Image (cartoon, coloured by chain):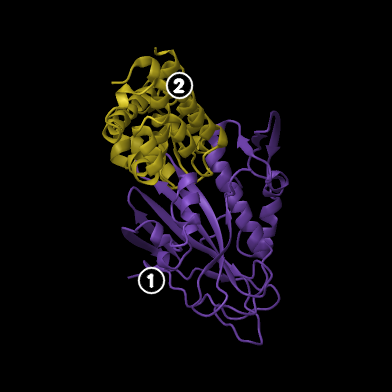
Chain colours: A purple, B yellow
C-alpha cells in the first residue's frame, strides 16, 4: 500500500533554512508553503509555484487573456485586467465582470492573488503557537465563527454581533468530515460543504509571531453558489484562541 | 408547470448570471457543468444528456460522451468556461440546453411550493426573486440560512424580504440589487393596490 498522504510542506528559506517545524528561541522559523497553494487559474497551466520567487513572479505574470470589468459606480468605463498586479490597482473599487457570468471565477482568482501576495511578502517568525493545532473533525470547534458557511449578509451581521457565538462549529453543525490530506479536509453541513486547505505559515503581519493562511471553498447542494474564501489566522499564546486577523473577499463598499 | 412568459424572463435573467455554455467545463469546485450552470454529477448523468458532435451535430455515443467527460474532469478546475472548449468535441444544442433549464425550473417550482405553500399566489416579481434565490442557493440553504427572509416572504412583507435577501460576495452586487428591486417593486405595487381599495 502506498503512503496515504504525500508530505505537503515545502520549506522556503528566506534568510536561512531551519527544519519544517523547528522553532528554537535563537532561530527563526521560515515561511512554509504547502502544496495546497493554488496560483490564479487564469495563468498558464505550466506556471511554477515552488518557492517565494516563483510567487513574486506570479504577481506580475500576465493572465491568459484580459478580463473585462467595470466599477459599478462608473459602469460606462471598461477596465481590462490581465494580472494580479493590475487587479491590486483596482481592488478598492466595486468591480463586476463583463460578462457578469465570469464574476465567480474572477473573484476566486483575485482571492488567490491576495493569497499569493501575502505569502510572497511573508517573513520568518520568531515565535509560534500554531504547531499544536490538529487538522481534524474537531477543528471547527476552535476556528472563528467567520469561517462558517454564512451566505446571508443579514444573518452574518446577527452572528457577528452575538457574543455567545465564537466558533464555526457554534454557527453550523458539521454533519460529516472527509480527510483528504494532512492539512486538507472537507466539512459537510446540511445542504453544503466547506473544503479547508492550509496554504502557508509564516509571519504575515510583521509582529514576529507565526500566522497561518487558510483557504475555504464553499459549495451547496442543488444550487450554483460557490465561493473561495481566504482567512489569515494567528495564535498569540500556547493553546490560546485562534484569532482572525483578516479575511477575503471583502464586502463591496 | 410555470407560465411560458415567466420561464422566458427567468431564462434571460439567470443566463446573464450563470452563463450559457454548450460544451462541458469545470466549475470553480471542479464539478463538470454545462448549459446554464447545470451541474453534471456523474458520467452516467452526462450520458443521459443529448450531446451531439460540435461540427456535424450527429448524436454522440456513450463512449464519446465518456471521452469528453473524462478529458474535462482531468483539467485544472476554476478556469473561465471558454478555456475548456478545446478539450471537447461535443455540445448540447440550444434546444437541449433550454429543455435542461426547463426541467430544472420545474423541479425548483416544486421545491418552492414546498417551502412556501402559497407560492403560486405570489406576485410575478416575488416569484422571479425566489427562483433566482433557489437556483443559486439550492433548497436546503435557502430554507436554513435565510430564516428571516423566509419569514418575511410567508408574511408577504416584501419590503422586509428585500432587506433580508442580500447574499455575501461572490454574488455580484447587481444580482443582489436585481432581487432586492423585484421585491421592492412588489411591495410598492402592493401598497398602491391597498391605497386604491375603497
The image position of residue A18, as x and y in percent, is 62, 81
Q: Secondary structure at mark 2?
A: helix
Q: Residue at x 46, y 74 (%)?
A: A133
The image position of residue B85, as x and y in percent, is 50, 34
Q: Chain of mark 1?
A: A
The residue tagged 2 is B191
The front one of A8 and B109 is B109
Residue A23 vs B38, above or below: the answer is: below
Pointers 2 and 1 in contact (C-beta within 8 Å): no
Q: Is residue A130 visible?
A: yes
User: Marks 2/1: CA distance?
Assistant: 67 Å
Q: Residue at x 29, y 34 (%)?
A: B111
How many residues crowd around disc 1 within 10 Å: few (fewer than 14), some, or many (20 or more)? few
- Label 2 or label 1, whichever lies nearer to me, is 2
Q: Residue at x 32, y 20 (%)?
A: B2
The residue tagged 1 is A3
Amino acid at each position: 500500500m502506498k503512503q496515504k498522504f504525500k508530505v505537503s510542506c515545502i520549506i522556503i528559506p528566506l534568510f536561512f533554512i531551519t527544519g519544517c517545524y523547528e522553532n528554537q528561541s535563537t532561530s527563526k522559523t521560515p515561511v512554509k508553503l504547502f502544496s495546497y497553494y493554488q496560483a490564479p487559474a487564469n495563468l498558464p497551466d505550466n506556471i511554477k509555484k515552488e518557492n517565494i520567487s516563483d510567487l513574486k513572479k506570479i504577481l506580475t505574470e500576465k493572465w491568459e487573456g484580459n478580463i473585462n470589468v467595470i466599477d459599478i459606480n462608473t459602469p460606462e468605463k471598461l477596465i481590462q485586467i490581465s494580472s494580479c498586479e493590475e487587479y491590486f490597482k483596482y481592488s478598492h473599487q466595486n468591480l463586476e465582470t463583463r460578462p457578469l457570468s465570469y464574476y465567480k471565477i474572477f473573484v476566486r482568482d483575485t482571492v488567490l492573488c491576495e493569497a499569493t501576495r501575502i505569502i510572497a511578502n511573508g517573513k520568518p517568525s520568531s515565535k509560534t503557537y500554531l504547531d499544536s493545532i490538529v487538522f481534524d473533525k474537531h477543528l471547527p470547534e476552535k476556528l472563528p465563527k467567520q469561517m462558517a458557511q454564512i451566505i446571508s449578509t443579514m444573518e452574518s451581521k446577527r452572528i457577528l454581533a452575538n457574543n455567545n457565538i465564537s466558533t464555526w462549529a457554534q454557527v453550523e453543525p458539521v454533519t460529516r468530515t472527509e480527510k483528504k490530506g494532512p492539512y486538507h479536509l472537507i466539512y459537510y453541513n446540511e445542504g453544503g460543504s466547506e473544503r479547508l486547505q492550509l496554504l502557508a505559515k509564516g509571519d504575515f503581519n510583521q509582529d514576529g509571531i507565526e500566522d497561518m493562511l487558510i483557504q475555504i471553498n464553499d459549495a451547496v447542494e442543488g444550487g450554483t453558489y460557490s465561493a473561495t474564501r481566504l482567512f489569515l489566522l494567528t495564535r498569540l499564546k500556547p493553546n490560546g484562541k485562534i484569532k482572525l486577523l483578516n479575511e477575503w473577499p471583502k464586502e463591496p463598499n | 408547470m410555470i407560465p411560458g412568459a415567466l420561464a422566458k424572463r427567468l431564462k434571460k435573467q439567470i443566463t446573464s448570471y450563470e452563463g450559457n455554455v454548450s460544451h462541458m467545463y469545470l466549475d470553480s469546485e471542479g464539478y463538470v457543468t454545462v448549459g446554464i450552470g447545470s451541474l453534471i454529477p456523474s458520467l452516467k448523468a452526462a450520458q443521459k444528456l443529448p450531446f451531439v458532435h460540435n461540427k456535424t451535430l450527429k448524436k454522440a455515443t456513450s463512449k464519446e460522451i465518456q471521452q469528453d467527460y473524462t478529458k474535462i474532469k482531468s483539467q485544472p478546475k476554476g478556469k473561465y468556461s471558454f478555456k475548456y472548449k478545446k478539450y471537447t468535441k461535443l455540445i448540447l444544442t440550444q434546444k437541449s440546453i433550454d429543455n435542461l433549464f426547463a426541467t430544472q425550473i420545474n423541479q425548483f417550482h416544486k421545491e418552492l411550493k414546498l417551502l412556501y405553500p402559497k407560492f403560486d399566489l405570489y406576485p410575478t416579481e416575488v416569484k422571479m426573486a425566489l427562483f433566482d434565490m433557489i437556483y443559486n442557493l439550492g433548497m436546503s440553504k435557502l430554507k436554513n440560512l435565510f430564516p428571516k427572509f423566509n419569514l418575511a416572504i410567508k408574511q408577504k412583507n416584501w419590503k422586509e424580504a428585500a432587506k433580508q435577501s442580500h447574499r455575501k460576495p461572490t454574488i455580484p452586487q447587481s444580482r443582489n440589487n436585481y432581487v432586492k428591486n423585484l421585491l421592492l417593486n412588489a411591495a410598492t405595487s402592493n401598497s398602491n393596490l391597498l391605497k386604491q381599495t375603497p
